[in-house]
Amino acid sequence: MSTFKWDHIHLRSPDPEATAAFYERMFGAEVIRTLPGGKPRIDLKIGGASVFIAQVNPGDKVGSPPKTPYQGLDHFGLEVKGIDAVVAELKSKGAEFTMEPNDIRPGTRIAFLRGPEGVSIELLERS
């Protein structure tokens, strides 16, 4: 059987700088700016994962952001310790939560917040 290794998440945004600033402010993402082929590109490193942000320009044939829940890729999750304190910190930075912290089963506590372009982000604490 073939072997697969996680590589990246790809986001599309009409304002990549604002999107990058959100992830940097909320999660301490490392913002990496490059000029491949002379075009600006913004990548992020969050919790060891790569997140690429592609520019969406007026007239691009790109659908509107979906409203969760929906079929297909629904959200991505970030593991945290002390979820209640993390949620309070993110709220102080202006994060909009769509689900407050709650126990979905013994030893697993989750919360959801909305990122730019309607991206749903899960915070997850396992004990």
Image: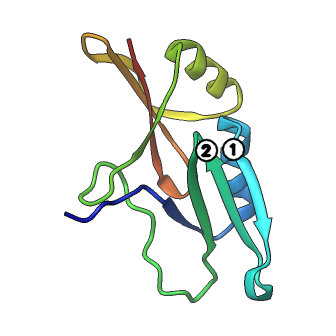
Left or right of residue 124: residue 55: right
Q: Left or right: 59 with respect to 38?
A: left
Please tell me whether residue 2 is drawn above or below residue 35 in the rendered image.
above
Give the mark count: 2
| Residue ID at (67%, 61%) | 43
Task: Please tell me which residue is depicted at 27% across the width and 55% down the height of the picture.
Answer: 70
The percent coordinates of residue 17 (x first, y second) are 75, 61
Say how the picture is coloured. rainbow
Taking the spot 66% from the left edge, 21% from the top edge, the residue there is: 89
In the structure shown, which secondary structural element does the residue marked by tag 2 occupy? strand
Residue 46 is tagged as: 2
Q: Which of the two labelled residues, at mark 1 and mark 2, occupies the earlier sequence position?
A: 1
Above or below, 77 relative to 86: below
Q: Quadrant of the C terminus?
A: top left
Q: Residue furthest front?
A: 1
Q: Nearer the viewer, residue 74 or 114?
A: 74
Judge left or right: residue 107 versus residue 97: left
Q: Position of residue 106 (x, y in %)?
A: 25, 10
Q: Dot 1: within a 10 Å radius of its alpha carbon, few (fewer than 14), some, or many (20 or more) residues?
A: many
Q: Which mark is residue 13?
A: none
| Residue at the image point whose x is 73% and y is 47% from the top | 30
3D distance between C-alphas at marks 1 and 2 = 5 Å
Question: Does the residue at mark 1 contact the one at mark 2 (Cβ under 8 Å)?
Answer: yes
Q: x, y percentage for residue 91?
A: 63, 26
Residue 29 is labelled as 1
Residue 28 in which image quadrant: top right
- What x and y, as percent, mark residue 23? 66, 46
Residue found at the far left of this picture: 1
The amino acid at mark 2 is Ile
Disc 1 marks a residue whose amino acid type is Ala
